[in-house]
Image (cartoon, rainbow, N blue to C red):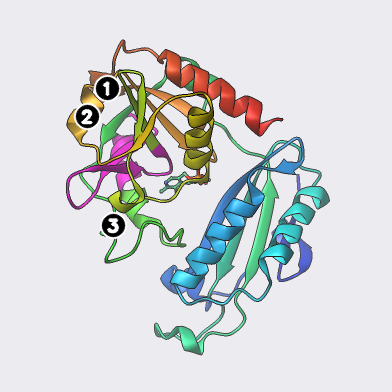
């Protein structure tokens, strides 16, 4: 079905929704984005996603021509205009058209784009039986080179790791950081369960501050589960009782094998299933 895509305040049919080949978003990956979900026509954690978008913009010295409130309204409008119920929204801000050459000061008119569409979920079987993942040899970007907290238009670091995962027959891959610690997966944050406690790497492990991650942490705290944001190693993963991933697309998905080693019982664990249910109830409330 043809979608109406928001570009700089106007809606245009998807086949006419284009950006220039001179846009630095294309030429250099110079821009930022967010991936959001809607449930029953309501955008999930809209303010948090928009705040992260504007933080990414600040980090790359990109001035978004509309306010955060206006961005929230535009995202809501894109969902309504396309009559999206349960869907996926991509908000993008590019540096805009510039000259050939890195200089962002030669760019004008950042392009604000919002695509609202339906989402292709992981197969239901993976939620029921859990994922197998492998550790990628490609490490997460060094935070001093390009902070993983910036959701930039350059996802090659993650794509290279994803290719390794796919070649090993896995839809996700675990990425370590420059210290050899567990960082995150290519498009998902990671959690472990051990002795009834929940563990996830801290932001200074060099990860994206996942919106789903924070929701799951809050839901776990409310359920009386102790949550520790601490550095984790591959060893911690291998000896964990349970493992799961969180992300806008994946929501909460169990991991049952890492690097061909069964995690815990080798089946989705009780705390994972409980938090998955709590997340669904919260998202669809
Ligand atoms: N880490 C990385 C590197 C991500 O890209 C997450 C963690 C999870 O964050 P959220 O805020 O979503 O809980 C992400 C998010 C896609 C897609 O189209 C990818 C993400 C989100 C939505 C869509 O592949 N990654």
Q: Mark 2 touching mark 1, by CB under 8 A? A: yes
Characterize the local packing of mark 3: few (<14), some (14-19) or many (20 or more) Cα atoms within 10 angstroms: some
Q: Which residue is mark 3?
A: 141
- The reply to whether residue 174 is in sight is yes
- Residue 251: % across, % down: 53, 33
Q: Which residue is mark 1?
A: 240
Residue at 65% over, 42% down: 44
Residue 268 covered by magenta stretch: no
Q: Real-space Cα distance between discs 3 and 1?
A: 25 Å
Residue 171, above or below 84: above
- Residue 206: % across, % down: 31, 53
Q: Is residue 92 left or right of residue 270?
A: right
Residue 170 covered by magenta stretch: yes
Characterize the local packing of mark 2: few (<14), some (14-19) or many (20 or more) Cα atoms within 10 angstroms: some
Q: Place residue 272 in its image quadrant.
A: top left
Q: Earlier in the sequence, mark 3 or mark 2?
A: 3
Single out the mark in the foreground, 3 or 1: 1
Residue at 34% over, 35% down: 228
Question: What span is colored magenta in the figure?
Answer: 161-189
Q: Mark 3 touching mark 1, by CB under 8 A? A: no
Q: Real-space Cα distance between discs 3 and 2?
A: 22 Å
Q: Earlier in the sequence, mark 3 or mark 1?
A: 3
Query: Which label sits on residue 236?
Result: 2
């Amino acid at each position: 079905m043809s979608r109406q895509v928001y570009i700089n305040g106007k809606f245009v049919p998807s086949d006419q929704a284009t950006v220039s080949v001179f846009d630095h978003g294309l030429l250099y990956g110079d821009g930022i984005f967010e991936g959001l979900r809607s449930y029953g026509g309501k955008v999930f954690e809209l303010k948090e996603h928009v705040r992260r978008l504007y933080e990414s913009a600040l980090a790359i010295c990109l001035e978004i021509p509309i306010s955060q409130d206006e961005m929230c309204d535009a995202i809501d409008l894109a969902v309504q205009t396309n009559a999206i119920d349960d869907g996926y929204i991509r908000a993008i801000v590019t540096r805009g058209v510039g000259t050939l050459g890195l200089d962002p000061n030669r760019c004008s008119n950042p392009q604000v784009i919002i695509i609202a569409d339906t989402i292709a979920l992981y197969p239901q079987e993976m939620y029921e039986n859990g994922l197998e993942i492998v550790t990628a040899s490609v490490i997460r970007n060094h935070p001093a080179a390009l902070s993983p907290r910036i959701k930039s238009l350059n996802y090659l670091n993650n794509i290279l790791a994803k290719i390794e995962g796919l070649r090993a027959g896995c839809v996700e891959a675990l990425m370590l950081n420059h210290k050899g610690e567990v960082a995150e997966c290519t498009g998902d944050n990671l959690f472990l369960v051990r002795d009834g406690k929940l563990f996830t790497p801290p932001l200074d492990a060099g990860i994206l501050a996942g919106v789903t991650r924070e929701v799951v942490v809050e839901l776990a705290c409310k359920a009386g589960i102790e949550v520790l944001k601490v550095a984790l190693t591959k060893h911690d993963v291998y000896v964990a009782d349970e493992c799961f991933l969180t992300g806008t697309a994946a929501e909460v998905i169990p991991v049952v094998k890492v690097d061909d080693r069964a995690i815990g019982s080798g089946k989705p664990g009780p705390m994972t299933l409980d938090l998955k249910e709590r997340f669904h109830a919260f998202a669809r409330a």
